[in-house]
Image (tube, rainbow, N blue to C red):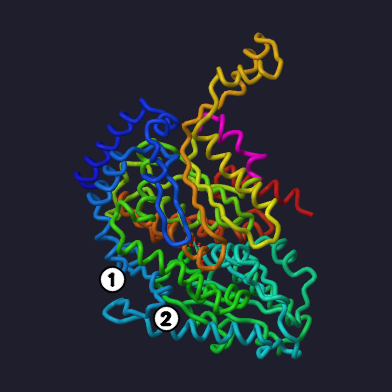
Amino acid sequence: MTDAVTRAFEALEANRRAMMVMSLPELFGEDPRRFERFSLKLGPLLMDFSKTRVATSTMRLLVDLAKAAGVEEKRDAMFAGERINVTENRAVLHVALRNLSGAPMMCDGRDVMPEVAAERERCFAFAEAVRTGALRGATGKRFTTIVNIGIGGSDLGPAMAAEALSPYIRRGLSVRFVSNVDGAHIADTLRGLDPARTLFVVVSKTFTTVETMTNAQTARNWVAQALGEDAVGAHFAAVSTNLAAVNAFGIAEAAMFRFWDWVGGRYSVWSAVGLSLMIAVGPRHFTAFLAGAERVDQHFRTAPLKRNMPVIMGLLGLWHRNVWSYASHAVLPYDQRLARLPAHLQQLDMESLGKGVTMEGKAVTRPTGPIIWGEPGTNGQHAFFQLLHQGTEIVPCDFLVAASPHERGRRHHDLLIANCLAQSKAMMKGRSFEEARDQLIARGMSRAEAERLAPHRVFPGDRPSTTFLYRKLDPATLGMIVALYEHKVFVMAAVLGINAFDQWGVELGKELATVLEPLVAGPGGAEEGLDSSTAGLLAQLRKLRV
Ligand SMILES: O=P(O)(O)OC[C@H]1O[C@H](O)[C@H](O)[C@@H](O)[C@@H]1O
């Protein structure tokens, strides 16, 4: 971390201390224009961060922090195709995948746009053929179910988006996702499916991931058993960067769709990794999804920092994580179809920001990414919101809600919105002891009893939240939301000086699993040298196994 960044953080620390004399309700009280001052609009989407504890001075200092850290230069380096993923020596160009303008994007001195466009066209043609029935299973029946086999970035993005866009899925088609190596997952996924009408899309950047390969093999056997070995080819497509491994699995080149090493797994839904989604919603809606993201990219590249939505999201993330020391961040979509958004953002944010060393390999001096978690409202209200309102941890929250639903009839949606607004208001405003007590007395309770109960009914308030309000959860808006969070993460990593694009932290467990698998499968007696916990668990496993 450079001296300039350290100084910018120190100035923010001082700002925090100064801010502590005023509560959020007081900030609202003193400035009737607080909402206008601390909200941003981008097309159909509004971001209201007036309920975070910031003043104009805070925002100025946060922008100074971004400048000191060279966020703009780093952003431009990403768009210019520089190898900013220094530990894997790769460029980071998922933005090229949604560059519908076709303007050149360079990687190693070459414009990648022609091959991006060509591969997208191949995917679209394949998707259309499945949708229209031009492409059928081995017995001549139309496909009615697409099963996406993948994990991590090869699962979460498309799974999240397919659920979010379910109103746009073609009638008569359904899409399922299987990821876990737990055999229960594929067993439950395949139950009730007709092999003759099922198309598998095996998605793996590396095509070596053990979960995906194991599930793909099981699916292959399932098809072969029902329809015969010769039928297998007609029921599989693959998405990967590893052509040789796809061939070795027996999937023909015509049914293989590729992407590039400059697309990180958690940033890959925009590529052929979105094939299942393309089949489900069709090329037109998928293009709208890309266009939403492209709109955010253009904004991220050109808007001044202080009015740049993903920049502000990232800076508020740093304000909360690094200046106020809040350890977690909740994503609360008041939009049931965004149920998998928290899981997608967990990978996006925690694999990107869960780092302990800087780009130069030195231990970081400040905390890095927060813990990301969440569930849709209103469900969460009846579960963990208790802690959000009265617990001792302060958790900054993102609320997301659409102005209009896809469904007819307004009652459900009016209730949904009212609840969303009520929660962020309650977090901000809280309820004092006196208010709680007087409320109880007004309901006819004795003063003594009211004073006994009131402490339990106090809400400290002053808890920060940001609300994203959008017209409707359509493909373009979903594209915007996902791209906003991607760039938010970019901004945080840029300031913290860490590499957002590698994930070495997932390797050790994989290596150890490879060593342990033969011990789990074997007859025992090979535990020598193992720690006593692992050895003890293996011994007990043998006793318990039926
Ligand atoms: O697409 P694949 O190569 O199968 O990788 C799937 C996932 O597994 C890895 O372990 C990484 O942690 C993820 O970033 C990646 O998305």
**Residue drawn where x is 58% and y is 42% of the image:** 532
Q: Which residue is mark 2?
A: 116
Q: Quadrant of residue 179?
A: bottom right
Camera-nearest residue between 493 and 387: 387
Residue 199 image position (x, y, % from top left): 67, 79
**Residue 211: percent from left, percent from top:** 60, 65
Distance between the alpha carbons at the discs numbered 2 and 1: 16 Å
- 172 vs 209, left or right, is right
Q: In this orientation, which residue lies closer to the viewer: 532 or 143? A: 143
Q: Secondary structure at mark 2?
A: helix
Q: Is residue 446 above or below residue 48?
A: above
Does the magenta run of residues contain 381? yes
Q: Residue at x 27, y 60 (%)?
A: 74
- At 52% from the left and 59% from the top, the residue drawn is 510
Residue tagged 1: 80
505 relative position to 142: left or right: left
Q: How many C-alpha atoms fall within 10 Å of the one at disc 2: few (<14), some, or many (≥20)?
A: many
Q: Are marks 2 and 1 in contact (CB under 8 Å)?
A: no
Above/below status of 478 relative to 416: below
Coordinates of residue 136 in the picture (x, y in percent): 69, 88
Residue closest to the eye, 479 or 419? 419
**Rendered location of residue 473, percent (x, y):** 57, 62
Q: Is residue 211 visible?
A: no
The amino acid marked with disc number 2 is Val
Magenta highlight range = 379-393
